[in-house]
Image: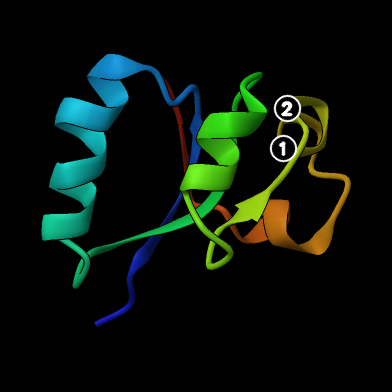
Amino acid sequence: MTTIKVGLVGLGEVAQVIHLPILQALSNKYEIAAICDISQELLAAMGSATTFLPLNAILTQQNSLSRKISTLCLL
């Protein structure tokens, strides 16, 4: 089964408490492919397995990873 590649914009409290745990629990269906947040601390806490993209790169699909994102969640 192919996973849906998700791009996340915003890693605030609701994303941390609700959205991220659900996506991780459903990792057989969803893959967090890229994240974007204004907080460098939150980005660093996500670890090196996730690609950090500027929002404009995600929205304008200026790189090969953003073209592979199936859905974009604005949190």
Looking at this view, name the residue that lies furthest to the right: 62
Please identify the quadrant where the N terminus is shown. bottom left
Residue at 58%, 39% in the rendered image: 43
- Tell me the amino acid under the disc marked 2: Leu
Q: Which residue is mark 2?
A: 55
Is residue 59 left or right of 8 when viewed as pictured?
A: right
Q: Nearer the viewer, residue 10 or 13?
A: 13
Q: Where does residue 15 sit, x and y in percent of width and height?
A: 30, 25
- Tell me the amino acid under the disc marked 1: Ile
In the depicted structure, whether residue 47 falls above or below residue 8 = below
Q: Which residue is mark 1?
A: 58
- Do tag 2 and tag 1 residues touch (Cβ < 8 Å)? yes
In the depicted structure, whether residue 68 falls above or below residue 60 = below
User: What secondary structure is found at the residue carrying circle 2?
Assistant: helix
In the depicted structure, whether residue 33 falls above or below residue 75 = below
Residue at 56%, 53% in the rendered image: 69
